[in-house]
Amino acid sequence: MRLLLSAALALTIGAGAAIAQAPPNATEPGLPMLALTNVPAKGAVNLTVTTPAFKSGGDIPFENTQYQGNKFPGLEWTKGPAATKSYAIIMQDTDGIRNSMPILHWTMFNIPASMTKLDAGMTTPPAGSAYGPNVRAPAQPYMGPRTPAGPKHRYHIQMFALDTTVDPTKTYDEILASMKDHVLASGEVIGLGQVDPSAPPRPPAPAATPAAPTTAPAN
């Protein structure tokens, strides 16, 4: 009996570890806190999303990461329903959890409904569209992976066809709330990120400066 309990405990611990650092799986549905899960499409229409840089579920080239160049990989998608007024893009790392949320790498909103492609190497948003927030700050351009050593991470580049536009200056949570019930169709392409073995290590963080004494030291 004690042996069976020990085995069950080991399985429970193993399952918990899998949740904290899930193995790459490009077909896993319903990831918690993923934008596609939180703001699902109203209908059954799917957008087919592709990039010329890699196949969905494949490795993201290092030139499209922060390790080498941070070049935008390019993106294409199938046209949304007739009522589409704009497209939105949300890129999340579901294996890099920070503050109980997937790391938000990049967002872009109010892409014109007439567009179905963003060129590789893009450095400024198309006319009428705007960058939204990422984990660093508001209005941030494409921020590719900088995956730490260890298992590969999944980067979800999610596309949404909306029957409205959104305010890209709002916080991520506010934008997501404004998208709710306005998603006509959605889809994603998933890339796998990994550490670049040729990259130099990150420089150590600067040492904290000691605080100045508030009173004169005793003699």
Image (tube, helix red, strand yellow):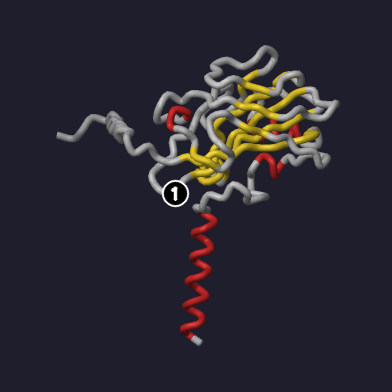
- Tell me which corner region of the image, top left, top right, bottom left or bottom right, holds residue 210: top left
What residue appears at the point 52 percent right and 53 percent down from the top-left corner? Answer: 22
What residue appears at the point 49 percent right and 66 percent down from the top-left corner? Answer: 13
- Tell me which corner region of the image, top left, top right, bottom left or bottom right, holds residue 33: top right
Q: Which amino acid does label 1 sit on?
A: Pro
* Percent x, y of residue 72: 53, 24
Q: Name the residue under label 1.
A: 151
* Percent x, y of residue 61: 46, 33
User: In front here: 65 or 120?
Assistant: 120
What residue appears at the point 72 percent right and 26 percent down from the top-left corner? Answer: 87
Left or right for 84, reference 3:
right
* Percent x, y of residue 158: 65, 35
Q: Residues within 10 Å of mark 1 (few under 14, many from 20)?
A: some
* Percent x, y of residue 62: 43, 32
Task: Return the residue found at the far left.
Answer: 219
User: In front here: 171 or 42?
Assistant: 42
